[in-house]
Image: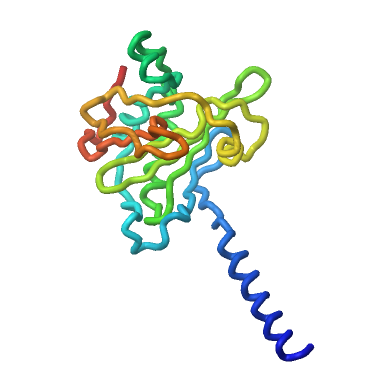
Amino acid sequence: MPPILSKHFALMLVFIFVVGCAGVQPAPRIIVQDTQTTVRLDIDTGIKGPDDPNRYAHPAKIEVGQLQTIFNAIRVQAQRPALQKKFKGKTLQHRVFEADEIATLAPIVKDAFSQASPQERVVFALTKTAGTGKEATVGEMYVKGRQLHFILTCYRLPSEGNELVTECHESARQGFELSFMQEEFFVGFGKSSFLLGNSTKELVIDFGRIPRTAVSGS
């Protein structure tokens, strides 16, 4: 092979290698995975390293009782335009997590936050039997400062496979929004997005003010 072609061929191989590596999503770190509950740590590729100013405050210390309080206070309802809310009042709210799910999830999430790096988010997926199939509730969490960000990606989405997180992200966006029943700990919703509008699927909670023991919600 002529020297100039050899040089071009080598450069092309390097380019393919670099592009290929850049497109590879690091494998998640599994904390718990069984037939009903998955909790894992996913790398956020938008954070460029442990010194990135947008990094998360991980590992984070958050108590089981604080997580129980948070999960117990989260509600979901149908998403409606502001005018419709004004003239027709509030829609029916549903608990995102049942008592048994909270009891299972809280200690696992506590453990996940204690292991998370500044570049990782805590991702969860819960399944419930529904008729002859199953439904999946999927979301993610991260901590910045003393504020916990809770994002609900799917709520009781009909599911047939085992890749619940992937299925959820690939599905059509569900028309729901969140609310938080304990206003004294509620900071606000996530930032507005050009594509998704006001992020009412993301709650920001001041968990540092929540007592370490579980607080009963309505």
The residue positioned 33% from the left and 37% from the top of the image is 64
Q: Quadrant of residue 99?
A: top left
Between residue 163 and residue 114, name the one nearer to us: 163
Vertical placement of residue 25 versus 105, above or below: below
Residue farthest along the top direction in this orientation: 88
The residue positioned 59% from the left and 69% from the top of the image is 18
User: How many labels sit on residues?
Assistant: 0
Between residue 9 and residue 148, name the one nearer to us: 9
Q: Quadrant of residue 1?
A: bottom right
Residue farthest along the right direction in this orientation: 1
Residue farthest along the bottom direction in this orientation: 3
Residue 74 percent location from the top left of the image: 36, 26
Residue 11 percent location from the top left of the image: 64, 79
The residue positioned 29% from the left and 35% from the top of the image is 205
Residue 16 percent location from the top left of the image: 65, 69
Quarter of the picture containing the C terminus is top left
Between residue 145 and residue 68, name the one nearer to us: 145
Vertical placement of residue 22 versus 176, above or below: below
The residue positioned 71% from the left and 88% from the top of the image is 4
Vertical placement of residue 70 versus 45, above or below: above
